Image (cartoon, rainbow, N blue to C red):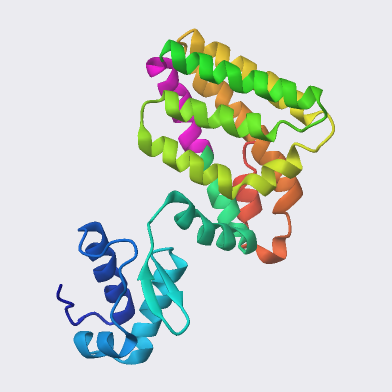
Amino acid sequence: MEFVPPKKTRLYHEIVTQIQNLIKQGLLKPGDKLPSERELTEKLKVSRTTVREALRVLEILGYIDIKAGEGAFIKEVTIENIIEPLKAAFSVEKKLILDLIDVREVIEVETARRAAVNASESDLKDIENTILEGIKDTEEGGIGLSGDDSFHLSIARASKNQVFELIMILIGDLLTKCKEATLKIPGQPLKTINDHKKIYQAIKERNLKKSASLMKKHLSKAKKNILSHFVCDKENIEDGAIDAYSDDF
């Protein structure tokens, strides 16, 4: 395996990309140990500071595990590895939460429309079961969070697009705290379940326009709740961000 000296201004970024590519090509596998900082410095012809920056980024992204006194080891890349550092970013950056809510609406309206076209009988049963899960949870004193997550994920799965499904897994994890708090609003779990029932029925009826429209209305209400409870501290958000995200209320 050959390491190539980087040429760009952001040297550490090119080193990160190079190691990522070696992992994708299978030349670096989970458990493999990277050369030491000194060896990488010599091979890549950069400073040790640049190498350390690159290794730090790779660690944050979940590609490597740095063990004190032992070195850097390649980790198995999983969805959890990718989600964890993003969770940290979203927990402190409210503007990112606003952007994520916006992306969620765009994507989920489309997944509902596609589910109305592509959902199999098995998919429809899965969606129905998530509603029953939410009902059972609320009857037992819960807030229906698990059923809510499963409902949206099952629709993404029914769209028959794996990328949509992966995105929904990511979004679900990143917005967990927001959704948990909004579902604690008195009466909200029942309202959410009623929305889910309507969306499910429209998908079952293969009504593309209605499925998309009902999902948009459902997410608009959810967005309003999240904005009210989490991101209305205008001092920590770019000027106008709240107004821009509140146009449909």
The magenta stretch spans residue 114: yes
Of residues 185 and 166, which is closer to you in this image?
A: 166
Does 92 sit above or below residue 141?
A: below
Q: Quadrant of residue 140?
A: top right
Residue 86: image location, x then y, percent: 52, 58
Tell me the chief SS of the magenta region: helix
The magenta stretch spans residue 198: no
Does 51 sit above or below residue 75?
A: below
Q: How many marks?
A: 0
- Image point (73%, 54%), residue name: 232
Residue 148: image location, x then y, percent: 63, 31
- Image point (59%, 53%), residue name: 97
Q: Quadrant of residue 249?
A: top right
Residue 10 visible here: no
Does 75 sit above or below residue 219?
A: below
Of residues 151 and 142, which is closer to you in this image?
A: 142
Q: From the viewer's perspective, tell me whether residue 219 is left or right of residue 6.
A: right
Q: From the viewer's perspective, tell me whether residue 39 is left or right of residue 234.
A: left
Q: Quadrant of residue 69?
A: bottom left
Q: From the viewer's perspective, tell me whether residue 104 is left or right of residue 238.
A: left
Residue 30: image location, x then y, percent: 33, 61
Query: Which image quadrant: the N terminus?
Result: bottom left
Residue 89: image location, x then y, percent: 56, 62
Magenta-highlighted residues: 105-119
Does 168 sit above or below residue 174?
A: above
Residue extending furthest toward the top:
205
Residue 100 visible here: yes
